[in-house]
Image: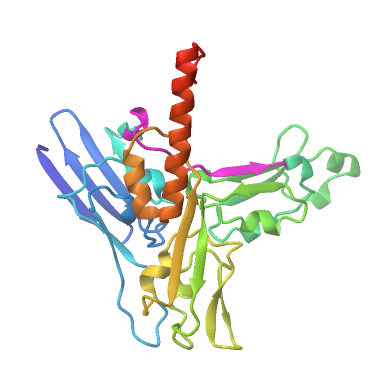
């Protein structure tokens, strides 16, 4: 048992701590990054995380759900950290981001597959930086010797020919919405979604003029309001299927969200199967379990034949 437990809730962060004789476990939820989605609460094996819908006046815009974590239930396993699409949660042991569920290979890491081909970038183009809804991209123009360029107009034509482009992305906070990829005029970016799925807004159940889901959606363009029918509609090209909208929807049956696939690192443990049951559709679970079954059968055959199993 810990010698001391601490829970600190400020406007900026929610911090949980276990202080032991020789170890210190700490969970930090950055409220400036958190979008109030449902991923961490669904993934938590202890049901320690709860998104709470915030009250509002009819004339006010909706605010994203407030995430609360029960210190008595949390065991600092780090699963919420690994699956948060926005990188809002960090779990540390003695100040180090060293998660036992990863070292023991009992849980996967969310894959954020973002490829940038700067050879395709044109000088002074910052379309991806401007398009990123979470401001996670910084484009820098460099001279041939690697120095940042403040004003391209001051360079000679020969210097312009040798310019290089550097694209920095805060990958650990990127939910892979693909807005940058779509907006890039040169096709320099390729982003593979972290979560795949389907989202439906049933217009017959959606209250006319209600924009609660749109108010809290962290990805500009994933939801939009149509004046024609006074309803919110979905643009699945940009949707990350995080569920922030689902939590605040005042009519539970108006919004339907299904996750069909999650892009993650390879895993062998059954702990992931239980999390998957809460996060994804039954069809996804069946597909993944079948794939694991085939891999295990193949590995068994390979061992019998004396082949090296990787």
Give yes or no for residue 105 being in the magenta stretch. Answer: yes
187 relative position to 180: left or right = right
In the image, what residue occupies the spot 56% across and 51% down? Answer: 193
**Horizontal and vertical percent position of residue 243:** 42, 63
Give yes or no for residue 155 being in the magenta stretch. Answer: no
In the image, what residue occupies the spot 39% across and 51% down? Answer: 88
Residue 270 location, quadrant: top left
Q: Which residues are magenta?
A: 101-117
Q: How is the image coloured?
A: rainbow
Q: Nearer the viewer, residue 231 or 35?
A: 231
Q: Which residue is outermost to the top? A: 306
109 relative position to 55: left or right = right
**Horizontal and vertical percent position of residue 249:** 39, 75
**Horizontal and vertical percent position of residue 15:** 26, 50
| Residue 24, placed above or below residue 72 | above
In the image, what residue occupies the spot 52% across and 79% down? Answer: 232
């Amino acid at each position: 048992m810990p010698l001391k437990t601490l829970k600190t809730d400020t406007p900026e962060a929610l911090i949980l701590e276990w202080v032991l004789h020789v170890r210190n476990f700490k969970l930090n939820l950055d409220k400036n990054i958190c979008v109030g989605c449902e991923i961490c609460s669904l993934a938590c094996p202890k049901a320690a995380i709860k998104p709470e819908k915030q009250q509002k006046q009819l004339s006010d815009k909706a605010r994203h759900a407030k995430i609360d974590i029960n210190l008595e239930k949390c065991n600092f396993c780090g699963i919420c950290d690994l699956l948060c699409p926005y990188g809002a949660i960090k779990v540390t042991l003695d100040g180090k981001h060293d998660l036992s569920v990863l070292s023991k290979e009992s849980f996967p890491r969310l894959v954020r597959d973002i490829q940038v081909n700067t050879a395709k970038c044109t000088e002074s183009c910052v379309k991806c930086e401007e398009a990123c809804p979470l401001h996670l991209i910084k484009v820098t123009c460099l001279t041939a010797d690697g120095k940042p360029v403040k004003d391209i107009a001051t360079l000679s034509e020969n210097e312009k020919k040798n310019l290089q482009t550097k694209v920095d992305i805060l990958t650990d906070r990127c939910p892979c919405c693909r807005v940058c990829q779509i907006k890039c005029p040169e096709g320099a970016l390729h982003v593979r979604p972290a979560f795949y799925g389907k989202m439906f807004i049933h217009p017959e159940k959606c209250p006319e003029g209600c924009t609660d889901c749109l108010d809290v959606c962290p990805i500009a363009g994933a939801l939009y309001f149509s004046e024609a029918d006074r309803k919110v509609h979905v643009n699945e090209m940009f949707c990350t299927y995080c569920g922030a909208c689902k939590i605040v929807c005042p009519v539970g049956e108006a919004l339907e969200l299904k996750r069909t696939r999650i892009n993650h690192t390879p895993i062998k443990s059954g702990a992931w199967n239980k999390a998957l049951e809460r996060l994804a559709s039954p069809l996804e679970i069946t597909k993944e379990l079948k794939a694991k079954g085939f891999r295990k059968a193949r590995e068994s055959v390979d061992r019998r034949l004396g082949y090296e199993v990787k």
